[in-house]
Amino acid sequence: MTADDLFGRLDDDDYPAYTMGRAAEILGTTQSFLRAIGEARLITPLRSAGGHRRYSRYQLRVAARARELVDHGTPIEAACRIIILEDQLEEAQRLNAEYRRTAASGTPTTAA
């Protein structure tokens, strides 16, 4: 592995760079919170060769959103479901916009 490969991973939002302890510290939460959102299938951390959970920056952002909802009184299971639904809505809106662009560019124009 070259130095360029290593530096490229630093920019990769999906690279599992953070241990559970470090992820909990960054989020200001507990390791049990991270386990709970994993059990709720909000995020699925990758495992190191030794079986330790590793989190990506993307997963930390999702966990931070869950923590925000939980801190405002939302039960953890409901918070996870809300985030999943938000993600599905965002994807549907992205696809809808893409279909509209395709339809608009594929429509023949007529000269008057």
Image (cartoon, helix red, strand yellow):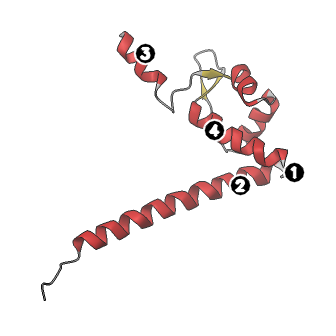
Q: Of the residues shown, which amino acid type is indicated by label 4?
A: Arg
Mark 3 neighbour class, 10 Å CA radius: few under 14, some 14 to 19, many 20 or more: few
- Quarter of the image with the C terminus is bottom left
Horizontal placement of 6 versus 77: left or right? left
Q: Is residue 44 visible?
A: no
Q: Nearer the viewer, residue 77 or 107?
A: 107
Q: Of the residues shown, which amino acid type is indicated by label 2?
A: Arg
Spatial separation of the CA atoms under disc 3 and disc 1? 40 Å
| Residue depicted at 74% across the width and 26% down the height | 24
Mark 2 neighbour class, 10 Å CA radius: few under 14, some 14 to 19, many 20 or more: some
Q: Is residue 34 above or below residue 89?
A: above
Spatial separation of the CA atoms under disc 4 and disc 3? 22 Å
Please report whichever mark, 4 or 3, sits nearer to the chain's N-terminal start. Answer: 3
In the drawing, what numbered circle is on residue 73?
1
Residue that mark 3 sits on:
6
Please report whichever mark, 3 or 1, sits nearer to the chain's N-terminal start. Answer: 3
- Local secondary structure at mark 3: helix
Residues marked 4 and 3 touching at CB (< 8 Å): no
Horizontal placement of 89 versus 39: left or right? left
Task: State the image coordinates of residue 43 (x, y, percent, origin top left).
Answer: 64, 40
Residues marked 4 and 1 touching at CB (< 8 Å): no
Spatial separation of the CA atoms under disc 2 and disc 3? 35 Å
Q: Of the residues shown, which amino acid type is indicated by label 3?
A: Leu
Please report whichever mark, 2 or 3, sits nearer to the chain's N-terminal start. Answer: 3
| Residue depicted at 65% across the width and 41% down the height | 62
Spatial separation of the CA atoms under disc 4 and disc 1? 19 Å
User: Going by the picture, which residue comes out furthest to the front?
Assistant: 112
Task: State the image coordinates of residue 104 (x, y, percent, origin top left).
Answer: 29, 72
Residue that mark 4 sits on:
61
| Residue depicted at 57% across the width and 61% down the height | 89
Residue that mark 2 sits on:
81
